Amino acid sequence: MRPSLIPLSLAVLFTSTGLRAELSVPSFFSKGMVLQRERDAAIWGKANPGGEVTVSFKGQSATAKAGADGKWRATIPTGSADASGAVLSVKSGDESVEIADVLVGEVWFASGQSNMFFTMDRVEAYADLVKATNLPGLRFFNAPLVTAVEPQEDISGEWVSATPETVPGCSAVAFFFARKLHLDLGIPVGVIKSAWGGKPVETFTSREALNTLPGTKALVDSLLAEDKVFDPATAQTAYEKRLADWEAAVKAWRAKPADQRGRLEKKPASPKRPLDTEGRPSADGRIVFISISMS
């Protein structure tokens, strides 16, 4: 899997799943974050439905109105690169959220499979470099490895600067890339890592998006229909019959002379919901399209 590094204005998209009246922002808008320089950065969250929200940063302000579902979104200019650390404030009525130590610089998204997920604590040759690293302007946000049937509006996690304590958990590819960029440009660099070994991009693609691909809608529809009619009790009964037949076949096979034994079928697997089974729709959110093995 070839890892990818894609610049962005700190925009991770999530959908709303519920209504909360209190003023709030997702956890990735938190202390120590980095915003993309010279862009209109999107800031969003929740507030009282219909309430006015004001976002302020480095002398600039922007307002937004929360919708009926409480969701709001505002954009605010970030200006040039700044390593001094500023406060981004969000206010609505008598409620406020303040995010301290916000830097402005380059923000990159590090995505991929095992190559991108491979962490610095596994790179023994650079142990001395890790111990010597203390770069306050180089920061990382590591997205947790979680699965969900529906897109989530928030994730856990925090921004951390590059220190001997934090670098071991960083993606090695992302660290070396971001470190060079930070040192060459002399400005803050932030990396959001969302990588998971063995997960195809379809894992993180919504059904609506998959339906836009040629031939995919029929596949997704058929697999979801299969899961909808799945009955655990019926599947268990069928499995027990297959298992009994298999055990009888094994017994008969062992009773034959060695030169008369054919190949035994594989032992049947215990039943699982189609959506929870590897190679079936949405196993950890995954749909496997084709797998080929050659030897």
Image (cartoon, rainbow, N blue to C red):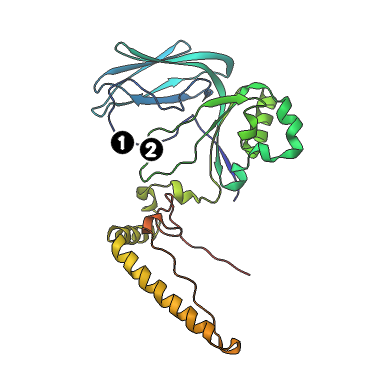
Q: Do labels 1 and 2 touch, CB within 8 Å?
A: yes
Residue located at (61% from left, 34% from top): 169
Residue located at (56% from left, 89% from top): 260
Residue 286: x and y, percent? 44, 52
Judged from the image, the secondary structure of the residue bearing numbered disc 2 is loop
Q: Amino acid at mark 1?
A: Thr
Q: Earlier in the sequence, mark 1 or mark 2?
A: 1
Judged from the image, the secondary structure of the residue bearing numbered disc 1 is loop
100 w.r.t. 171: above or below: above
Q: Is residue 50 visible?
A: yes
Residue located at (44% from left, 13% from top): 60
Give the crowd class for mark 2: few <14, some 14-19, many >=20 residues within 10 Å: few
Residue that label 2 marks: 152
253 w.r.t. 91: above or below: below
Q: Please tell me how many numbered marks the rendered image carries.
A: 2
Please tell me which residue lies in front, 227 or 50: 227
Please tell me which residue lies in front, 211 or 273: 273
Q: Quadrant of the C terminus?
A: bottom right
Q: Is residue 230 visible?
A: no
Residue that label 1 marks: 17
Q: Is residue 117 left or right of residue 252?
A: right
Task: Estimate the spatial distance between the alpha carbons at disc 1 and disc 2, rounded to whole Å.
Answer: 7 Å
Residue 219: x and y, percent? 37, 61
